[in-house]
Image (cartoon, rainbow, N blue to C red):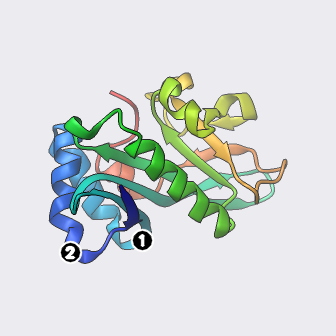
Amino acid sequence: MTVRREEPRDQLAVESVVRRAFGEERVVGLVAALRPATLSLVAEEAGEVVGHIMFSRCLLDAPPRLVEVQTLSPLSVVPEWQRRGIGSALIAAGLRELDERGVPLVFLEGDPAYYSRAGFTTARDHDFRKPSLRIPDPGFQVVRLSAYEPWMTGTFVYADTFWENDCVGLR
């Protein structure tokens, strides 16, 4: 398996992966809307795109000032390729790159049993507040990277694109 940056030629394959993984168009629309300003990686197996992950710029409303952070959303793996380490490889590659870029925190909404394997923990346990009551506390998670500093606490703020596409809150 190869993990690499998404290229323009991958767009249709990525849409197919996201559609097959989520079974709905709303998340496909989110990916299209986020694409210009994001870290987007794909996983290839035998020349076929079988997985995709996006990290997008968001904010942390910390008491001293706003902090640029990232959110991991969405992570998609074609159903027949799930449970083979593709999602984990995509997460690890993305977090490595974001850490090298000096990003202090990465947030997500997701299954704690799955994402805890990649180092994510419940954000509330670290004094972070979720942006919506629709997000269950255990599903609101964070990983602290090398640039994190203890004063970085506060409320996570999604980019407008997540709200416009109704992609806030686990359903």
Give the number of the disc on residue 37: 1
Q: Is mark 1 on a helix, strand or loop?
A: helix
Relative to residue 155, is residue 111 drawn left or right? left
Q: Is mark 2 on a helix, strand or loop?
A: helix
The spot of residue 132 in percent (x, y) is 49, 35
Q: Which residue is drawn at 35% across and 63% down?
A: 34
129 over 102 or under it: above or below: above
Is 98 on the left or on the right of 154, as rendered? left
Q: In which quarter of the image is residue 154?
A: top right
Q: In this view, does 125 lie to the left or right of 158?
A: right
In front: 49, or 30?
Answer: 49
Q: CA separation, marks 1 and 2?
A: 17 Å
Label 2 amino acid? Arg
Crowd class of label 2 (few under 14; some 14 to 19; many from 20; radius 10 Å): few
Find residue 153 and report its horizontal and vertical position in percent. Answer: 75, 45
Q: Quadrant of residue 95?
A: bottom right
Amino acid type assigned to the residue bearing label 1 in the image: Ala
Give percent across and percent down for residue 139: 51, 28
The residue where tag 2 is placed is 9
Find the residue positioned furthest to the right.
150
